[in-house]
Image (cartoon, rainbow, N blue to C red):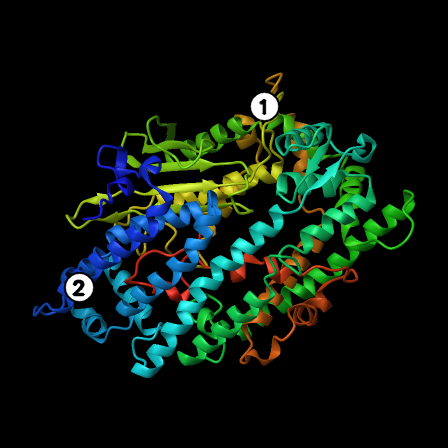
């Protein structure tokens, strides 16, 4: 019998996993054994002669795959945050295995008959609101993912889902490897003109770590890329870095073009097999927008407002650059540089002035103090909880009366095995186990923040502090739920709502009352000056037209890929992309391909539960 105890250790708080005892080489064997156990339990549910009830069908089935859920939650947590080449290779094997199993359950006529029977009698079952929502999500998960298809079409669906389960991790890995492959090594300090001292220090330490003597090394990780593009005076070097960033997984050894074409083609086939014209039609049916016409109307409205504002932003930056010695046309690698200079001129404000007031630990403490005032919860470091990396800190989250809410794993700095960006994920949702006991959530927040140097703590930009509050808002959504059904607890809500708690948290950040709790100079202890807060608040709308218009272009690109009703239109990825977004881009095209690293639309969504959303569908809830 396979020992799954390392994934939920009985003598650790909340049965947390012991990452130190989970061996990379065991994942596939453990997954296969967990599936074997789950199949036997599902067979027991299927063979029952009892009339279907919520307890003997929905609850029973939800507890069939406990071990599988534990193993996959750990695996996919690490695949994003602490990946290795071996894990990426395993993902190619694990995807089809779990896809096959989820489809075996999701397409099983006997299982669906029990759920369909419950759905037909739902108004007579005396279900609570929570139970009714779980039943609805279950029934829709089956019907929207092929339960009513013919046997022949079910076989086609299985093959499509199997292929998709391999392509999504392949897409993510290509983007990660391509970004990691780039280094800009500078040996002449004069080439660093304009860069803040903390950025140069970090680049020096990166170079030392990578074996480059007497040099400065810049990468495509955001804490390196963003300040370089914002402050580096050397235009040629900015162009070099911009071109590398824009060409991630495009035309190199990790090219994603074929993966994109295959993903889009398979999504079209899948949607049409299920009775929809396009993948967008399939997805939007369960979104607030409901259909593409509504999306198009909304984007057109945004575009109408954003375009003149974006054009004004571009004209203002161009005029300012020309007034201050720049000759020629602005290029994409000039925009962040000159916009920062214009912002400083207009508002007498440089965001680098904020860094000394945002040491990481103080920001973490501030987010926790804010949550205590707002929600009545405390977050306290807890010792003895094994983590997957030395950078990870674990906190126990409790109500003020001492009631435990869950554990929070916080992981803040970039490294080679971590994908870019920031996200909140769950190792376990709040749920009810097979004994009827409540399982409390294990939640992670993962970032790629500025690292500490030998001489200074990690000093964050305001955007990074905002990201911390945003992802912590998602974490609180998972931690503070009182729902005991994993399928609908925490962030397992309608997609349109999932961002609300995070937006609420970050919107407090420009309030002096919030900042004054924690924004203190890391050397002097001085509270952030009121005039600096006012400058921050005054500059918040700077370049918003430009930024909104860019978001419209990304939305249009997403819709262009997913409103196709035939794969015939995707012979050339870059040409397709240019046709989709050219009218929303105000600068001439200079190279690169957004689609090839556009993980939000091509990366597989992290999901929970075989019962509710078959894993091959790639339409479950995401790491938010």
Q: Secondary structure at mark 1?
A: loop
570 relative to 480 in the view: left or right: right
Q: Look at 46% across and 59% down and name the residue there.
A: 604
Q: Secondary structure at mark 2?
A: helix
For the residues labelled 1 and 2, say whether their Cβ atoms are less than 8 Å apart: no
Q: Nearer the viewer, residue 263 or 345?
A: 263
Q: Nearer the viewer, residue 300 or 613?
A: 613
Residue 245 vs 216, above or below: the answer is below
Picture quadrant where residue 475 is located: top left
Task: Write down the residue under mark 1.
Answer: 520
Label 1: few (<14), some (14–19) or many (≥20) C-alpha neighbours in 10 Å: many
611 relative to 92 in the view: left or right: left
Q: Look at 71% across and 65% down and name the residue there.
A: 584
Residue 403 vs 555, above or below: the answer is above
Q: CA distance from mark 1 to mark 2?
A: 55 Å
Residue 494 appearing in the image: no
Task: Write down the residue under mark 2.
Answer: 57
Q: Nearer the viewer, residue 76 or 469?
A: 76
Q: Look at 39% across and 78% down and name the residue there.
A: 274
140 relative to 263 in the view: left or right: left
Horizontal and vertical percent for residue 345?
81, 38
Q: How many marks?
A: 2
Horizontal and vertical percent for residue 487?
30, 56
């Amino acid at each position: 019998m396979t020992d799954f105890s390392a994934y939920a250790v009985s003598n650790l708080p909340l049965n947390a996993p012991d990452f130190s005892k989970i061996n990379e080489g065991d994942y596939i064997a453990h997954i296969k054994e967990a599936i074997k156990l789950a199949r036997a339990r599902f067979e027991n549910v299927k063979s029952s002669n009892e009339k279907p009830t919520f307890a003997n069908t929905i609850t029973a089935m939800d507890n069939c795959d406990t071990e599988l859920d534990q193993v996959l939650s750990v695996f996919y947590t690490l695949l994003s945050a602490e990946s290795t080449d071996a894990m990426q290779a395993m993902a190619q094997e694990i995807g089809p295995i779990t896809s096959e199993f989820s489809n075996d359950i999701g397409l099983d006529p006997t299982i669906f008959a029990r759920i369909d029977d419950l759905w037909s009698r739902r108004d007579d079952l005396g279900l609570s609101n929570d139970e009714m929502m779980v039943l609805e999500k279950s029934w829709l998960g089956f019907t929207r993912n092929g339960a009513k298809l013919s046997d022949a079409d079910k076989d086609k669906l299985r093959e499509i889902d199997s292929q998709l389960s391999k392509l999504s991790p392949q897409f993510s890995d290509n983007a990660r490897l391509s970004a990691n492959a780039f280094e800009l090594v500078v040996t002449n300090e004069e080439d660093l003109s304009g860069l803040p001292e903390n950025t140069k220090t970090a680049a020096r330490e990166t170079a030392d770590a990578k074996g480059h003597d007497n040099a400065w090394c810049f990468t495509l990780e955001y804490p390196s890329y963003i300040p370089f593009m914002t402050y580096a005076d050397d235009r040629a070097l900015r162009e070099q870095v911009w071109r590398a960033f824009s060409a991630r997984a495009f035309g190199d050894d990790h090219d994603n073009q074929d993966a994109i074409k295959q993903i889009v083609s398979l999504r079209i086939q899948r949607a049409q097999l299920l009775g929809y014209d396009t993948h967008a039609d399939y997805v939007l049916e369960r979104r607030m927008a409901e259909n593409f016409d509504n999306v198009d109307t909304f984007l057109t409205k945004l575009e109408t407002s954003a375009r003149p504002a974006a054009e004004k932003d571009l004209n203002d930056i161009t005029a300012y650059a020309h007034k201050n010695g720049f000759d020629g046309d602005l290029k994409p690698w000039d925009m962040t540089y000159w916009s920062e200079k214009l912002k400083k001129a207009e508002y007498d404000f440089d965001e680098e002035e904020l860094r000394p007031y945002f040491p990481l630990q103080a920001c973490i403490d501030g987010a926790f103090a804010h949550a205590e005032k707002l929600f009545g919860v405390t977050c306290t470091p807890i010792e003895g909880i094994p983590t997957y990396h030395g950078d990870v800190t674990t906190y126990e989250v409790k109500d003020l009366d001492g009631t435990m809410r869950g554990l929070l794993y916080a992981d803040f700095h970039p490294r080679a095995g971590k994908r870019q960006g920031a996200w909140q994920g769950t190792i376990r949702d709040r749920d009810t186990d097979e004994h009827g006991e409540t399982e409390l959530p294990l939640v992670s927040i993962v970032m790629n923040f500025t690292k500490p140097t030998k001489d200074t703590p990690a000093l964050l930009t305001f955007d990074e502090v905002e990201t911390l509050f945003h992802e912590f808002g998602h974490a609180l959504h998972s931690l503070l739920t009182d729902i005991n059904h994993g399928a609908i607890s925490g962030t397992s809500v309608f997609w349109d709502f999932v961002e609300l708690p995070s937006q609420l948290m970050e919107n407090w950040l420009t309030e002096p009352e919030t900042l004054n709790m924690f924004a203190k100079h890391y050397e002097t202890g001085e509270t952030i000056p009121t005039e600096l807060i006012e400058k921050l608040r005054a500059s918040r709308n700077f370049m918003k037209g430009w930024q909104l218009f860019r978001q419209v272009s990304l939305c249009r690109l997403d819709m262009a890929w997913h409103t196709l009703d035939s794969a015939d239109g995707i012979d050339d990825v870059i040409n397709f992309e240019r046709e989709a977004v050219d009218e929303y881009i105000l600068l001439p095209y200079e190279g690169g391909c957004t689609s090839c690293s556009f993980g939000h639309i091509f990366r597989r969504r992290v999901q929970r539960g075989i019962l509710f959303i078959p894993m091959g569908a790639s339409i479950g809830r995401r790491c938010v």
